[in-house]
Every structure is written in structure tokens, then in C-alpha cells.
Image (cartoon, rainbow, N blue to C red):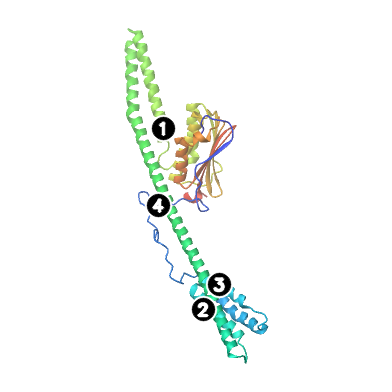
Amino acid sequence: MQSAGGASENTLLFKVVPRNKNMSAPEPSVGVRPNVMPGLGKSPKNERGARRIHPRSRWLGFASLACIPLVGWLDHITGPTLSFALFYVPPVAIAAWYCGRRLGFIAAFASAAAWFTAGIPESEPLSIALVHCWNATTRLLIYSLVAFLVAAVRQQRDQLQTIIEQKNARLELEMAERALAEREIIEAAAREQRRIAYDLHDDLGQHLVGIAFKAKLLDEKLRSTHPEQAEEASTIARLANDAARQTRLTAHKLDGANGAIDLVTALPKLAAAVEENCRVRVSVNTSACSVSVSAQVALQLYRIAQEAVRNAIEHGRAGKLEIYLVSHQEQIVLTVSDNGRGFDPRVAEQGLGFRTMGSRAHSVGGSCELESRAGGTTLICRVPISRTPARVS
């Protein structure tokens, strides 16, 4: 958890996780590559003037059409002295934005027709009527251009949104594949550690015990006739016993916890082993944890606690450790704090232990945060409860 370094306060974050409110990472089945999401790699295609219209937006387009007669009526009662030609533009733009190019052109034609009808000259010369028709045609072209441009902008926006959604889908797929790979690597490493632990305990450990036993017998035979050689045999027996004991401790550290474990009982056992072997005071508090975690989550939290304790003792020279396991705000929170010397974040980022703890937390949808201050270091690991079984009654 620590490395020799300055005592100034620093913070190191391993992973920001998670995306939804429970910070849950995707959980594809082990050994099975997540299915490629449909539509990935395809260019977004929008038919000319056509798009999927949300039902809640459709009524806005038709409501804008209903406003055109109202504007035409106002244009009619005010007469030629006050023009409302500009007020036809918003209904055209709204219709084109929410319902597409086709309805935008319909709104443009309706606006030009309403303007033409509202300003039909009465008993005027033919030249005046032709001018009025020309002005109506000009307005039709302007309103149609507005509808075309607004629909084009909306189409570009929809295409960009589709591209963003596809990139987000690819990112989620990559995150799922990465989480799967990390989980497989961690599980393979755990299996290999257990195999090495069993080999040490059953093979090397038994051989060392046999050597110690033979040396003890030799000591007893030589004690009366060759006391000096007997003393050497006794030394060999003592060294062999020490090596066997160290082998058992190493095997226990490598094996750690296997199968389904209960963190409420496993963490105090870890603390007791550390106090006995390392002469370091370790306090454990699990009373605030009211949920039962799954075997996978429990194993990763236990390994993180092991690594944090080991780093605190080996690198931080800590004399006191505190381990807390609580359930808080839909999360399981593991906290390991010490009174060691702190660490340098630039050095810690390169450490395999820190990266391993972050990967273990991320493999179960969690995150690790490491803080260092003058009085020691604190590791905080959070895992969403959604990865755990139902709450224990």
C-alpha cells in the first residue's frame, strides 16, 4: 500500500469506473467474446427528407401548420400597410425541424398561399395582380429555402448523433472485452498461485520436514560420541524446520482464500496472521457490513486487502493497520489505512502492486483510490452492491 517517499499528502486514483449509477461493469460470460452490437461499422444513412419522428415531437410540426392560418388572418386584417411576411418563417422552420423536409415544404407552400390570399388586390389593374403573384412566388422560394436549410441542419445533427452513439457502443464493447480479459487474467493468476501453493506445501514442505527429521535422528545418534557433529546436525534440523515453516507461510500467502469465503471471518484471520508473523498491530471492523458478497467479489477484495497490508508493512514500515469493511450507498467499501511513511505517486504508479489492486477492483466493477498524507496511507476500494447477492436479513 505504501512505498518509501515523501510525507506530503497525495492522491492516486486507479480507475473511474463506471458509467451508470451503480458503477457496474459489463459482465460477459467468461471465455465468450461479447457479441458485436448491431449497426457498428455502418455509416448512418438518412433517406432524403425522412427520419424517425418522435411521437412527442410530431405534434409540434402540425401545431406549426395550424399557426399559418392565424398569421394569414392577422396579415389580412392589418392590410398592406403592415406586413406579417416574416412571421411565416417560424412555423416553416418548426415543421421542417421536427417533421422533416417534406412537411417543411408543405408549410412553405401553405405560408406563401396564406400570404397571397391575405393580400389579394381588389379591383386593381392586371399589372398589380401580376406583381402580387410574383411576390407570392418569391416568398414561396424563400420559405422553401428555409425549410430545406433547417431540414439539412437537422439531418446533419442526426447523423452526428448516430456516429456518437455508435462510438459509445464501440467503447462499451471494448470496456466489456477489457473487463473480460482482466477477469480471465486474474482468475488464471489465482489458479497458478494456488497450484504453486499446493506444490510448496505438499512437495517442498514435506521434503524439508523429512530433512529435519533425519537431521534430528543423526543428532541423537552422534550426541554421545561426536558432540560437535551432533551440534551441526542439530543446526541442520533447526534450519530445515525454519525453512519448512517459511514454506508453509509462503504457501498460505499464495493460496490466501479459495472457494467461497466470508470476508467477515476471513479478514480477522488475515489480521491475526499478520500480527503473529510480522509483529504489527492490525484492527479489523466489519460490523457495518450488512450484505453478503459473491465469491468472486469476496476473493478480489480479500486479495486487495492482502496486497495493501503487504505494501504497508514492506514499503511503508507501518506499525499499525486498520481494516474496515462497510456497506454504504449501494456499495461495499473496503478501507485499509496505516501509520507508515507515505508514498510518492510518481513511483507508486509504476508499481505492480498498485496496478494489480486497481485491476482486481475493476474486474468486479469497482474502483480503488489511494491517498497518502503525513500520518500514513489509506486505500479505499469500492464495489457496487449490484454485483453481490440480495441483502441479508
Determine the secondary structure under disc 2. helix
Residue 175 spot, x, y in % from top left: 43, 50
The disc placed on residue 106 is 2
* 73 or 179: nearer the viewer: 73
Whether residues under marks 3 and 4 lie with C-beta atoms below 8 angstroms apart, the answer is no
Of marks 1 and 4, the one in the foreground: 4
Give the percent coordinates (x, y) of residue 273: 47, 31
Instruction: Report the mark closest to the observer, 3 or 1.
Output: 3
Q: Earlier in the sequence, mark 1 or mark 2?
A: 2
**Mark 3 touches mark 1? (CB < 8 Å):** no
Say which quarter of the image contains residue 213.
Answer: top left
**In 3D space, how far apart are the residues under numbered discs 4 and 2 (Cα atoms)?**
50 Å
In what element is the residue under mark 1?
helix
Q: Where is residue 353 in the image (x, y as percent from the top left)?
A: 46, 36
Question: 22 or 299: which is nearer to us?
Answer: 22
In the image, farthest residue toward the top: 225
Residue 93: give its label: 3
From the viewer's perspective, is 352 left or right of 324?
left
